[in-house]
Amino acid sequence: MVSLLVIDDDQILLDLYRQMLKRQGYRVHTADSGEKGIRMFDNGDYALVITDLVMGGMDGNGVAEYIRRSPKGMVPVIGVSGTPWRAHDRHFDAVMEKPVSMKDLVASVRLLAGWPSKGRGGREGGAGCGTIQT
């Protein structure tokens, strides 16, 4: 099963992302801060990371930069924010403006992380290529 890591300091959004992505067949792990997220990233095996940009402590730019400098630096990262212009684009595979369209988020996840199983579209896990313009 394709595992995703979602990082956001808004618990309501974390729950929404988790429920929606689980319904699509993904295994979803969540963290409510950038610091917790990078610890989970280091100890896990994720096909993709979704992170809020504006959080207390380590923000989404810090999370994405950490991922890019890590041995697992090829893991795709999607940034979500009400202030998408604050994203350091070179660290993100896609940046989406809040409120995020769940349909667009799922499409981006499928493109970058792969489908959750062969039964849905014939493609199983694996990183996509290219940058999504949103």
Image (cartoon, rainbow, N blue to C red):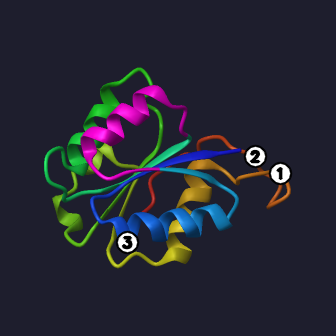
The Cα atoms of the two marked residues, 3 and 2, are separated by 29 Å
Q: Secondary structure at mark 3?
A: helix
Question: Does 51 lie within the magenta span?
Answer: no
Question: Can you say which quadrant of the picture contains the C terminus?
Answer: bottom left
What's the residue type where badge 2 is placed? Glu
Tag nearer the camera, 1 or 3: 3
Identified at 45% across, 60% down, the residue is 132
Question: Can you say which quadrant of the picture contains the N terminus?
Answer: top right
- Which residue position is annotated with label 2? 124
130 to 97, vertically: above or below: above
In depth, the one of 56 and 54 nearer the eye is: 56
- Numbered circles on residues, count: 3
114 to 52, vertically: above or below: above
Residue 99 visible? The answer is yes
In percent of width and height, residue 37 lies at 35, 42
In depth, the one of 111 and 1 nearer the eye is: 1
| Magenta stretch in the rendered image | 30-46
Question: Does 33 lie within the magenta span?
Answer: yes
In depth, the one of 94 and 35 nearer the eye is: 35
What's the residue type where badge 1 is placed? Lys
Q: Which mark is residue 17?
A: none
Q: Earlier in the sequence, mark 1 or mark 3?
A: 3
